Image (cartoon, rainbow, N blue to C red):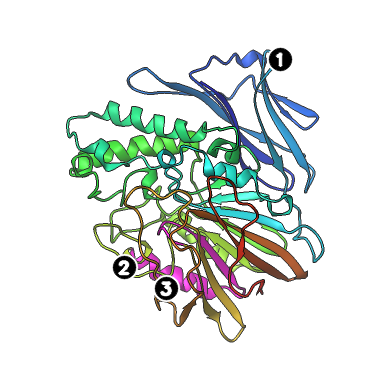
Amino acid sequence: MPFLVIPNEVYANDATIWVAGINESIDPATAILEYGSNQKALNTGWRDFETADGKNRIRYQRVTLSSLLPRQPYSLGLRLGGDLKADGSITTLPYRLPVAGERALTVLLGSCYFGRGDRAGAVGQTYTQLPHDARPDMKFLCGDQVYLDSPFQDFLNPFHDKSWLQARSFKTYVDSWTQSTPAGGFARMLKHNANFFSSDDHEYWNNAPDVGLNVPFYTATPGRRKDWWEMARELYQVFQTTPGLSVKFKVEPISFCIAETRFNRGSGGGDFMLPAAFDDLGNWAANLDGPGVLVVGQPFFENTGSIKDYGLPDFKKQYERLKEYLRQSKHTIVILTGDVHYGRFAVANLRPELGTKLYEVISSPMQLLPLGGVDYQAAPQVFGSVSSQPEFSLKRNHFLTLEFTAPSAQRASMLVRFWPITKNGISGQSQIIGNGPFELI
């Protein structure tokens, strides 16, 4: 089994890099992470996870690199006993957005990746064949990076125990995180440049932590839901990230905030974030001194759902407070999200007296799961008058890129591009969404 080097958060002067060996021996005394012409010994800090059946294990750690130079490429390499075991790369962020004529700060937005349906590695192939000027500096993967509960046929046997579920979930992660084909593979996308992760329900099961109607035998009782919830949360922290307060950083004049609305979610009607994290999000919105970009796992422009699948509006108290938090901002906010299996671009007035807007950009899915297709829905009128651009995803697998530049010191410009996933690569067939670029004030 392989060794892996996958960047997590990357900023202007520091980065967090996830390194791992799956069913491999790692001698910490000889472990080194190379970054550019530098290297860091990995003699300590390793953590171990082993499945309950004893058949699979992973040794991993998250390595902090500091004193990096802004807007610079760094090659990454994991060496053990002098031998190169895995590689990757990062490009650090700039302090400020590029101006017109410079290469834009580019973000990839994606969600909903059913790895079992992407045997050819088409998502990674599309990523690796992006034109040079379109390659993202960072990726916002905002939920359902894995489907631990699909296909549903695997869950028709009610007698599988917790050990079986854990082993199957571990393999689901490994299959996606290590997928590499001659032309692409999901692993090849993950190992280049930053990955900012947030989770949604399929990192657990559909509609988690409530009953999942697609997996009734495994979620029917509080005890079975608790077992799966705890196991899936542990794997999420092993492979993706450990949520706390929202991840926040700035590339002047834009402030970014990646919020976690699933990992600490209560049952429908409760809260989707812990109070401290939710208040921290409110403080971020209220104190913006330039445009803001908020990444969440489910759409904000949405109607209430049902026991089939709860959304943010079903958590009425926090949802209404989130509206108030957004209204506090003196600047335009862009919400980036996924989940719903179609792409959508919508906008509403935020503070009409200031001329600010609330944009929402949805990218979903990267790889649709069987029977997961749904019809496009325009944004509902849940925040005053909300208007939607014409449908652009047309039930195609895709991801989006957002290109940010700075026309002036306190304003930003955003151009949104749609990239369909095709098995033979993209052949340059992107589509600009809306009448962009859009000015963010």
Distance, label 2 to label 3, CA atoms, is 14 Å
Numbered marks: total: 3
Of the image marks 1 and 3, the number of the one nearer the N terminus: 1
Instruction: Mark yes or no: residue 365 visible.
Output: yes
* Dot 1 amino acid type: Gly
Q: Quadrant of the C terminus?
A: bottom right
Whole-percent x, y for residue 34 in the image: 72, 27
Residue at image location 60% in from the left, 73% down from the top: 332
Q: Residues within 10 Å of mark 2 (few under 14, many from 20)?
A: few
Whole-percent x, y for residue 138 in the image: 64, 49
Residue that badge 2 annotates: 304
Whole-percent x, y for residue 407 in the image: 77, 71
Residue at image location 45% in from the left, 63% down from the top: 394
> Residue 69's mark?
none
Residue that badge 1 annotates: 82
Q: Is 318 one of the magenta-colored residues?
A: yes
Distance, label 1 to label 3, CA atoms, is 55 Å
Instruction: Mark yes or no: residue 249 visible.
Output: no
Whole-percent x, y for residue 342 in the image: 44, 61
- Which image quarter: residue 230? top left
Q: Residues in magenta? A: 315-342
> Which mark lies nearer to you, 1 or 3?
3
* Dot 3 amino acid type: Ala
The answer to which of 331 and 401 lies nearer the viewer is 401
Query: Along the horizontal axis of the image, is 83 left or right of 293?
Result: right
Of the image marks 2 and 1, the number of the one nearer the N terminus: 1
Residue that badge 3 annotates: 378
